[in-house]
Image (cartoon, rainbow, N blue to C red):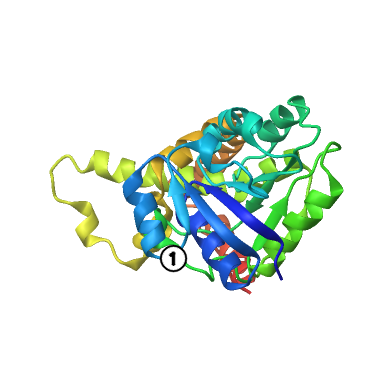
Amino acid sequence: MLVFKKVAIVGVGLIGGSLALSAREKGVFHYIIGIGRTLRNLQKAKELGVVDNYTVNLTEGVKNVDLVVIATPVGTIIPLIEKMLPYLKEETIITDVGSVKGEIIRKVDKLHLSNLYFVGGHPIAGTENSGVEAAFSDLFTGKKCILTPSKQTNLSALEKVKKLWISVGSEVITMDSELHDWIMAAVSHLPHIVAFTLVNFLSDIDNLNKNLFKFSAGGLKDFTRIAGSDPIMWRDIALMNKANLVDLIDRYQKKLNYFRELINQEDFSNLFEEIQKSRNIRRNIIK
């Protein structure tokens, strides 16, 4: 089911590379151009069959394409769109995969694209690994992809992007961009901040160089797996979703202080209840 004949992927890493692999496999993309900053990664992408051709020149790479997928850190998305606009043919669709949507949608709407179309997207999929070598075609199978149209979103473009994500195995959900950002702050962005903080904290308190981490079992490794995520990507996410994230960090700290008091006061009953509650919720999440 060919949806887009010629596609440019800006940022051929885990997400962009996986989308290219899967869409080609499903016959949704015919010809793929990889665009990025480093030739080494782009050359590897071609060797792996992720892209057909590549360039480090954004304005050359997006000429005459039907779709541009921006799979770069969220802080770069608007500058990239602004730079490519004069070089796109009419009715080109631009979409992204960023996990913060509100600010991006607001700024794109102010550009008044007229004969060009933007559809905000966020596949809820990924691993702690990055780079094109981490890409695989089944990444999106059974995962959710959130699309965040605004009042200015072209409905035909929205439908095409929806078909793309369905074709690679995703369950597509449309949602208001502000609601999306609050939900992602709670279930994704905050957990990453907690993991980053815990790993750094344990390193900081290891002042006797006993290498605490060599004594850790599976629990710490499982809990902190996401601490290995890309630092540029997560720096940009944290800053772009600042209001939601700061609010949730403050509320999380209150909950952590509550646990501290239960332990300090040796409150056996309430401490048990809190742990039991968490255990039940976790089991339901897995189901």
Q: Nearer the viewer, residue 63 or 220?
A: 63
In the picture, measured across the screen, residue 213 lies left or right of residue 19, that is left
In the picture, which quadrant includes the C terminus?
bottom right
| Residue at image mark 1 | 49
Determine the residue positioned at 40% across, 46% down.
230
Q: Position of residue 32 (x, y in %)?
A: 54, 56
Mark 1: which secondary structure? loop
Residue at the location (52% across, 65% down)?
21
The structure residue drawn at horizontal position 67% and vertical position 62%, both measured from the top left corner, is: 144
Residue 197 horizontal/vertical position (percent):
39, 41
Does residue 209 sit above or below 58 in this rendering?
below
Q: Is residue 4 left or right of residue 139?
A: right
Q: Amino acid at mark 1?
A: Gly
Residue 92 picture location, percent across and down: 71, 44
Q: Quadrant of residue 241?
A: top right
For the question of whether residue 161 can be seen, the reply is: yes
Residue 129 visible here: no
In which quadrant will I find the N terminus? Answer: bottom right
The one nearer the camera, 273 or 217, is 217
- Does residue 264 appear to the left or right of 171 in the view shown? left
Identify the residue at image location x=49%, y=43%: 261
Q: What is the number of callouts on the image?
A: 1
Residue 177 appears left or right of 244: right
Q: Quadrant of residue 143?
A: bottom right
